[in-house]
Amino acid sequence: MLELFAFPGGVKPDSHKEESARTPIVPAPLPPLLVVPFRQSATGGVDIRVQAGEQVLKGQCIGSAEGPFGTCVHAPTSGKVVAIESRTLPHPSALAAPCAIIEADGTETWRERVPLDPYATDPAQLRARIREAGIVGLGGAVFPSHVKMNARIDTLVINGAECEPWITCDDRLMRERAPTIVAGAAIIAHLMGAKRILIGIEDNKPDAAAAMRAAVAAVGQGEMQVISVPTRYPAGGEKQLIRVLTGIEIPYGKLGPDFGVQCFNVGTAHAVARAVLHDEPLITRVVTLAGNYVRPGNVEAPIGTPIDALLALGEPKADTDRIVMGGPMMGFVLPDTSLPVVKATNCLLAMSPTLFPPSPPEMPCIRCGACTRVCPMVLQPHELYWHARAKNFGKAQEYHLFDCIECGCCAYVCPAHIPLVDYYRFAKAEIRAREREKAAADRARERYEFRKFREERDKAEKAARLAAKAAETKAKLAQEGAEAVIAAAQSRAHAEEKDSS
Ligand code: SF4
Ligand code: SF4
């Protein structure tokens, strides 16, 4: 039996999983208009490949990956691109970005699909397929999966912990599609050379664990084990689950592959199997409707579906006052429910004043240290708070601001009701914005310096050309002068010869 380890900190909020996990995943109806953001991953850019007025097929690449961190974006259905325009994204920053507005034709006509045999395919080609399928981490981070697969490891961890309260999309996926998840895990392990696969599931999901065990047994994957881990938030954090299953503690600034281990969410493994074995890119995702709904549950929605259309399926109760994307610990309030479903949309949590009473007013920090005791990343949250609040971003970085996984444990226990994570998000966003501004200024300065260098080089080349021309003319004149002198001397010599004869 595998020895389990504890991770530092953590909290144990009420899980509230039963409400939405009772019923099977239902497919969301195809909306008449989809809004597909071209930015769907945490990193990298996209090269837009369609224009307004163009017909597209289901699964057609409409944005190709730019740079090593880019991932492709696809049409979730067949139809017509009626516009390419900037729309607000469902993201804490509420920034706008280019989106394809697709009018569905209702026929769901696929592009040609070419399944691969993962065990007879070159690893580079397999990774390229995963990149071209637009697969990103579906646990919430939306980091491009092909980048994480670019390493050799001993142990692959498949994350089925789903520790955040209320969210049950992974639970239902494991109960209903365990064989596909197992197939995806085996493909990733093959690609990365992993000798063992550990699938971690919190012990509050016994049905999911049983389904996964049955799927593993059915394919006889000897090196694959399903392990129930204690329910403690945030056991589903990547570093936390690796710690629980392997005992490996990944320090600041290091990544799993530095220790021979890598972690992928169950939804990501499922998407990998669909992409490789069926050539289906990531164009849908399972979204939990939990909280203040008449009909909580899980729906599988095409990316780009308006969130309003999904809410209508769950029917938020009359006293609903906010919709949060994500769970109560890590989610954020949506500014507008007409925004589209994106690859990061794991849950739409309906909140009401009764179910989620408003937080009491923020009080001054009393330096009680409760936040430090529960931080799973062993940070000092109150120090981060002080420096973020004072906009002393350099100091916040010295206290490892970017190691904060925004799990919300510190805010959950804070007796002063300080929305600590909001301060960290603000500080991170400011630092990133300043870095972007600095990079833009550096690029402008480089451009200016290059232009000056080119002007001076052109000037010097022109001067050299003129000098060469002048020297050439001078030499020519000198040559012509010499020839004239010689000709005169010769003619004089002839004349003298004639006279003497
Ligand atoms: S828990 Fe709240 S009050 Fe206590 S030290 Fe942390 S930030 Fe300050
Ligand atoms: S939100 Fe950040 S600082 Fe707070 S407990 Fe989680 S990792 Fe630690």
Image (cartoon, helix red, strand yellow):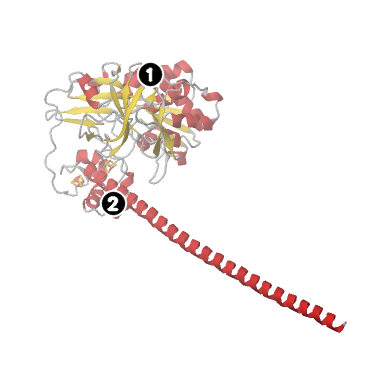
Q: Give the residue type at disc 1.
A: Arg
Examine the image and state in which quarter residue 345 appears. top left
Q: Relative to 427, is 299 above or below?
A: above
Numbered label attached to residue 418: none
Q: Nearer the viewer, residue 235 or 425?
A: 425
Examine the image and state in which quarter residue 173 appears. top left
Query: Helix, strand or loop at disc 1?
Result: helix
Query: Helix, strand or loop at disc 2?
Result: helix
Badge 1 density bin: few <14, some 14–19, many ≥20, Cα 10 Å: some
Q: Is residue 364 left or right of residue 155?
A: left
Q: Quadrant of the C terminus?
A: bottom right
Q: Where does the image place residue 183, in percent across and percent down from the top left?
A: 45, 22
**Earlier sequence position, callout 2 versus callout 1:** 1
Q: Is residue 283 left or right of residue 156?
A: left
The residue that appears at 27% across and 35% down in the rendered structure is: 89
The residue that appears at 45% across and 34% down in the rendered structure is: 146
Badge 2 density bin: few <14, some 14–19, many ≥20, Cα 10 Å: many
Q: Where does the image place residue 300, in percent across and percent down from the top left?
A: 31, 21
Q: Where does the image place residue 230, in percent across and percent down from the top left?
A: 32, 29
Residue named by callout 1: 177
The residue that appears at 52% across and 30% down in the rendered structure is: 125
Question: Can residue 358 be seen at all in this image of the molecule?
Answer: yes
Q: Is residue 361 left or right of residue 228?
A: left
Residue named by callout 2: 396
Q: Nearer the viewer, residue 347 or 361?
A: 347
